[in-house]
Each structure stands twice: as structure tokens, then as C-alpha cells.
Amino acid sequence: MRYSSKSNYISDDKNGEAGNISATKHPLYWGRISLLIVSITTLIFGGCTTLSPTETYLNSNVISENHTKFCLIRPRTKPKIPVTPDPLPTKTGPFSLNECIDLALKKNPGVAANAWDVKTAAAEKCTRSAKRWPRIHLTGDYFHYEDVQRLVPPSAPGKASYYTDDIASANLTLQLPIYAGGTLVNEIRSAALLTQSAEHTLARTRKELIFNVSSMYYGILAQRHVIKSLEFSYGALEQHVERVQNFIAAQKAAKVDALRTGVRLADIEQQLLRERNTLSVHMHVLSNFIGIEAKDFPNFDISGDLTLCKVEEEERDISLALTRRSDYAAAAAALEAQARKVDVARGNREPKISIEAAYGGRWGIGDSEKSAGTNSHAFSIDKNGNPSVSHTSPLSGGGSLTPTFGLKGFNSLRYSQSTVEDADSFEEIGKIGITVDIPLFEGGRIRAAIAREYSRLHAMQQRLRQLELQIQLEFDTASLNLDSARKRVEVTSKSISEAKESLRIEREKYDYGKGTILDVLDAQSALLNTQVNYYQALRDHNIGGVELRLALGKIGIKNDPLTRNKDRITTHSKKATDLKKGEK
């Protein structure tokens, strides 16, 4: 038998069970209801992180609805946080080189993506740093049990306990790491170094963008001069065709001269079409570098003169390149971060010690069901040697009745009532202590993780060495290209006047009948080639100057925010240089 406050005695037979059901619902009934509610909730919300998923694409014109038609969950509404697109440039006239660079640094999506990478790395650093602080959580739960459970363990002998099959609890928990084998510190250091690496990568991306915009800018200016030279040659040949036609009418020239001039004129025309198309392509490429679309800014144009830029000789100092190159600083910082990751993997061998504390309470839902006393028998002998037998039977209300029988029959009847107070349906629970986690066997996981991080470290060391060779190669290539372009400018600038004089002489010889049409066409072609070669050499010289500054890490614009990272770049580069000397 068991005693219940809901009914007097609850028998284990069918009649007792039926009587109990008439007073209250069977526990399985509420258990089935709870299971049904949990199942329905799981089917509806299972696996869902949010009912309003984050918007995937931003201002993209190429993403159609077909890309998301297979998504299980679609956004029901527009994003709550509106995204304001970058404003278009308000200037209507042509842009100078510095204006193009400024606009590109503001609107280029590659630069913007790297800027977000910096914020991502900074957030990761904050995430790692937060592990040093205590974790305080508020937790709660509710469980329905198949069998009746004690609400809390008894805290003192004879104290009443609360029994129920529905228990709810709420706790305020605290966890503070004390010792983690250096993993937390090294994770924070690694995240900080990766943040600096992301900043250096952003700086390098900006500098490469400046180089690309400058190269395309000079290419467009040179292409315009090439087109002007072709247009001049085309106009000159048209005039020459009229002159040849007049000579043929006066029987002073053969028809073949007109045919040869027409063929040359057609060749100049096709070159003119090709170079105009190249100019249009260059304009679109420049717009792409800047980050604007032709339909949004149809009147985009540039202005400027293609002049010979000056390159100071003291700029050609390769010894300072490693301390100025942002990509080298980014690689050095990433290498240091990887070294800290090796320390993190090694620290996983160490024990983990932390303080844990919790305070809260448990609630019993429903009336208490407590175990009643059971029937008991006792045999005793008094000091006179008289034996006696007693039988104790539990009564409703918590009391008991004990009759005693001796050799002569009935001796006595004792009634007792329990003085234990009824159990409370709420109990406070609190604890505090220290936990120690010692890894004894991980199946080789820690050893494999250490080997993996060491392999990554060695690979990054070799990539850093490869980058050093690449920097040297870029410096040598830029220097050779710049010197070659400067000499080409000097040679072609002098030959232009000579080619013009040669064309004038050949035309006069042809007019006086002492020259051939081939001599005139050759002189015209030589002048065109000389002009084209001059402007291309001038373009290559200006691009070579920018390329050399990029190789030395000195490219930039005035008051560029990237100069703020100069100290960090120098620090990481010097560390990498010292490491390289130590290996030697």
C-alpha cells in the first residue's frame, strides 16, 4: 500500500486504481498530452534558427527568384534594417586621377569586402577575449516523469520529502575558467594577430586598387593619343587620295597609286575601329575598378595630360620594401597567429580548472504523493523473561496503530501520530565548487591536431619565403620596365620630328614626279608607328613608376588612412626579417 493525500489508501489492485482515476486524471494522460505538444512543436519549429531568415543578397541585379526557389524557408518580409546604397558621384564633368582613386576607394566592392573582413576578425577577437570572463546563464526546464520522483534529496533525518511526477526548475549558473593550459591566452593573441593581418590585407587591397586605377587611367590617356594619331593619318591619306586622283586625271600618276593608297586607307580605318573599341573596353574596366555601372553613370569620363612622371632614385631601395609592404606584414602577422594556434593545440594536453556555481529552485507541480509506512512486526522480551509480539499498521493522516500480545493474550494498544511537517512544493538549491578536466585518452586527437597546426605553420613559413622572392622579383621587374620605358620615350620623342620631316620630303618628291607612292605610304606608316610607340612608351613609363612604388609599398594618396598601419607593418615585417636572419 501507499498513502496519498488525494485519497486515503491507494490500493495496488484494480478497484483501488479505478477509485483513484475517478478522483483525478491518470499520470499517463498528462504525459501523453505533453508528448503530443512537444512532438507538434518539434515538427513545426525543428531546425529553424529564426522565422525571418537573414537576407542573402544585397543590391544584386543578377540574382533571380530561381536561385531561392528550393529554399525551405523564405523571408516573409523585407529586411528590418534598410541598406542604404552608396551615393553616386555628384560631379558631372570629367574626373582626374586623384578623383578616380578617391571614388574607387569608396565604392569598390573588393575594398568594402576586405573592410568587412577586418570587422569580422575584430569580432572574432572579442569572442575569444570573452572566454576569459565568467559565463552567467539563466536556465529553466520542465519534465514529466513516468514514476513519482523526490523533489530534492533529504537534507536532514526525519524531514518530510515532496514527491511528484511533474517537476520544474530554474537556475542561475556561473562558470569561471581558472586554468586552461594557455589555450585562452593564445586564442586571444592569435585572434588579435589575425585582426592585424586583415587590416594589412585591406591596406594591400587598397594599394593594388590604386595601381589598377592608375594603370587604366594612363592607358586610356595613351589610347586617346593613339586614336588621334590614327585619325590624323586617316585624314592625311584622304587628302593624299584626292591628290593622287588629280595626278591620274592629269596623267601624271598611274591608277595603281590610287589602289595602293586606298588599301592603306582601309588598313588605317580598321586600326581606328580596333583602337576605339579598345578605348571603350578600357573605360568599362576603369568603371569596374571604381565600382560604378555605366547605366547609373553614363557620362563618366576622365581628364588629364599624359606627361612623363618623375621617379626619384632614392625610391628604389629594396631594403625598405619588406618593412613597407602591407601584404608582407599581413603574411607575417598570419604566421605569428599560426604559431599561437600551435600553442593552443599543445595546451589541450593540459588540465582545465574552473569554478562553477549555481543557485535556483525546483517546483513540484501538483499535490505531493509520499510513501506511507509499511506493516511491521516486532518480538521483544522484558526483564522478567516474558515474551511479547507487536504489529504496527499505518493509518490515514500519517498515524499508526500498534497492538501488543503476550503469553496471556492482549497486553496493550498504542496509537502514535507523526510530528513531521508536510513537505514544501518549492526548494532552493545552491552549489559552488571547482571542476577539473584532465584529458587522459582522446584516441590521438590532440596529437593529430598538434601535427596539423605544425604543418600549417611550416607551410606558411615557406609561403612567407616565397613572398619575399616575389617582392624581389616585382621590384626588379618594375625597375627594368621603368628604365626601358624611359629610354623608349627618349628615342621615340626624337624620331617623331624626323618622321614628320621624312613624310614632308617624300610628298614633295612625289608631287614633282621624283618619288613613288610606296615611299609616301612608307613615310606615312613610319610616322604613325613612331607616334603610337611614343605614347605607348609614355604610358608604360607612367605605369612603371606606379608599379615600382607598389613593389616598394610606397603607393598611396595624401592623407590616406592606411598610413595609420605603418607602425604595425614595420613591426611585423621586422619580426619576419629577424626570423629569416635567425634561420640563416
Image (cartoon, grey):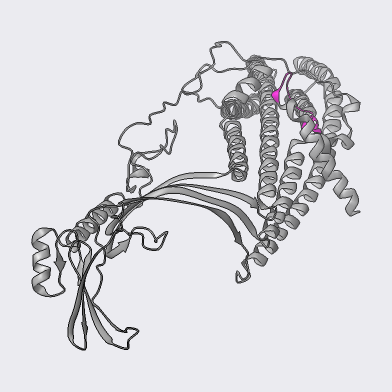
Residue 556 lies in magenta, yes or no?
yes
The reply to whether residue 181 is visible in this rendering is yes
> Quarter of the image containing the N terminus?
bottom left
Is residue 575 placed above or below 244 in the rendered structure? below
Q: Determine whether, in the image, residue 467 is placed left or right of residue 433.
A: right
Judging depth in this view, the residue of 509 and 84 nearest the camera is 84
Q: Residue at x 78, y 19 (%)?
A: 503
515 lies above or below 551:
above
Figure quadrant of residue 32: bottom left
The magenta-colored residue range is: 548-561
The one nearer the camera, 179 or 434, is 434
Residue 81: x and y in percent read 41, 28
Percent x, y for residue 5? Answer: 19, 59
Q: Would residue 273 be counted in the magenta stretch?
A: no
Residue 487 spot, x, y in % from top left = 87, 28
The image shows residue 2, relative to residue 342, as above or below, that is below
Q: At x 18% / y 67%, what residue is drawn?
A: 395
| Image point (51%, 44%), residue name | 136
Residue depicted at x 77% and y 32%: 550
- Residue 457's spot in the image, x, y percent? 73, 55
Q: Nearer the viewer, residue 559 or 54?
A: 54
Q: Is residue 530 left or right of residue 104?
A: right
386 and 583: which one is in front? 386
Q: Is residue 325 above or below residue 359?
A: above
Q: Is residue 234 visible?
A: no
Quadrant hosting residue 13: bottom left
Side of 194 where 580 appears, left or right: right
Count of marks overlaid on the render = 0
